[in-house]
Image (cartoon, rainbow, N blue to C red):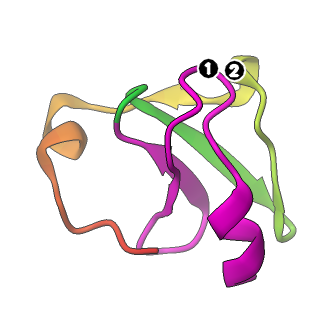
Amino acid sequence: MNKALLDILVCPVTKSMLTLSKDGNELISKVGGMAYPVRDGIPVLLETEARTLTAEERLESGSTK
């Protein structure tokens, strides 16, 4: 994902920063506890498409930008 795009995208629910998952398939909102899918390189920032992070995922600090 383009870093410039990632720098301006925010969680649509909390307006907090998003980080790209290690595999690059999701944008993670730690504050909102949500993971938004990235499909064909396009972030899908719809609350209805997001999944809730597990407790373990919320505690991880390993997600990178």
Percent across and percent down for residue 27 are 57, 53
- Residue in the image at 83% along x and 71% along y: 41
Relative to 25, residue 54 above or below: above
Residue at disc 1, secondary structure: loop
Residue 47's disc number: 2
Using residue 64 as the reference point, say whether residue 39 is left or right of it: right
Q: Amino acid at mark 1?
A: Val
User: Which stretch appears magenta?
Assistant: 1-30
Element type at mark 2: helix
Q: Residue at x 71, y 59 (%)?
A: 8
Quarter of the rendering containing residue 4? bottom right
- Relative to the observer, which residue lies in front, 23 or 6? 6
Contact check, label 2 and label 1, Cβ < 8 Å: yes
Residue placed most toward the observer, 21 or 18: 18
Q: Which residue is mark 1?
A: 13
Q: Is residue 16 magenta?
A: yes
Instruction: Say whether residue 29 is left or right of residue 54.
Output: right
In the rendered image, the quadrant that contains the N terminus is bottom right
Residue 23 in the image, given as x and y percentages of width and height: 49, 74
